[in-house]
Amino acid sequence: MGELNAQTVREVGKAFCLAGEMKEYAPVKTGNINTTLRVKYQDCGSEKEYIFQRINTFVFKKPEELMDNIRRVNGYIEKNFPQEKVLRFYETKDGRNFIYDKENAFWRVTDYLPHKKTDENISLEMITNTGYAFGHFQMLLAGFDGSTLYETIPDFHNTRARMDKLAQDVKEDPAGRVEQVRDIIDFLGSVEEKACELSVKQAEGRLPIRVTHNDTKSNNVLFDIGTGKPLVVIDLDTIMPGLPMFDFGDAIRFIAITAAEDDPVLDKVRLDMSRFKAFTEGFIGQVAPALSSEEIDSMVLGAFSMTVELTARFLDDYLCGDKYFKIDYPDHNLVRTRNQMKLAQEMLSHWDEMEKTVRDVAGRIKAGS
């Protein structure tokens, strides 16, 4: 992909019929997949800022399907809940919400929304608000048939498929590393059946397919600068058919851990139940009325499944010679693997407490609805 320059940025803005003249642009450092720019325009003396994104088509191989998912989901919310804020995507003269530039790069444009910055020391209040934002997002889409969406990354949260691939790579041992990780392989074997229960239930049709965000981190919610309340959910690339336990579980895996997911000091890796409860209050507190009893009873399983799944993915990449995840040093993926295995073990030891928290919140909300 060619280097970005002012002319390319101007041509993108022109294709989306943006008013005024492009004055300046700067890269946005957050996010590891797409190239994101904050672009300032001036029109008749007033200034307006936009976000330009060049989509990574190596990761998202069918970007037009990705943008169709976004168009349909946003359109559903705007039609049925006109008071709700959605992330606006600009359109070309022929009504498309994307363009290809001269080098066949794929672009889209949204408004820049001023927002409160999030950091690693996120407060319990902001964790609850993060849960609220993603739970509310799912609640708004409870009437949308998630099975009609495209899978932007096939089998993204198919734990069974992830475990099967790991098993094959353990047999082949492409990088000669299997003997170093027998204890991890044994652990994953001992919890495999439990971790794959959601995949089985989904395949059997016991859990309804819904719209899922699939990247439920606090930095994918914009918060109001003054109040700290959620403004809008962003980073909609991974909207797909899925289970609400995916969104709940991946958020818990990320937000309720007491250390970074690549911290090598395993004694620091614990499940913070105050963070778990804060997110649960927000997420379950919003979406519980739309969920079945089996879905609510599967939430903790979702957290465990997402953690075991990522443990397997990190380990698989390590066994294959570190081909997928970016590493900063030779054993980086192994450190990540052991870190997430420790978190999965923490979840097993807190299982009853987690389930009681989910049931208590869901019961209180359903009783009052």
Image: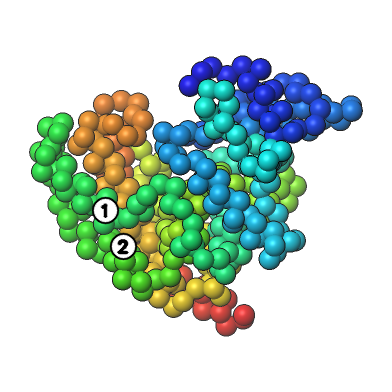
Question: If you read the primary sequence from the N terminus, does the residue marked by circle 2 or circle 1 appear first?
Answer: 1
Q: Amino acid at mark 2?
A: Ser
User: For this rendering, which residue is in front, 356 or 43?
Assistant: 43
Residue 108: assigned label = none
Name the residue tied to disc 1: 161
> What residue sits 71% from the left and 38% below the top?
93
Q: Quadrant of residue 298?
A: bottom left
Q: Secondary structure at mark 2?
A: helix
**Residue, x 61% and y 51% (percent of image)?**
71
Q: How many marks?
A: 2
Q: Is residue 185 visible?
A: no
Which secondary structure lies at badge 1? helix
Count neighbours of disc 2 (C-alpha within 10 A) and say few if under 14, some if 14 to 19, many if 20 or more: some
Question: Residue 199: which disc?
Answer: 2
Residue at figure coordinates x 50%, y 52% from the top left: 239
Is 240 rendered above or below residue 317? below
Name the side, left or right, on which 48 lies relative to 204.
right
- Distance of mark 2 from mark 1, alpha carbons? 9 Å
How crowded pointer 1 is (Cα within 10 Å; few <14, some 14-19, many 20+) is rated as some
Picture quadrant of residue 368: bottom right
Q: Position of residue 367 (x, y in %)?
A: 57, 83
Relative to 208, is 53 on the left or the right? Answer: right
Estimate the x, y position of residue 86 in percent, counting from the top left. Answer: 67, 52
Q: Are marks 2 and 1 in contact (CB under 8 Å)?
A: yes
Which quarter of the rendered picture does the C terminus lie within? bottom right
In the image, what residue type sits under mark 1? Ala
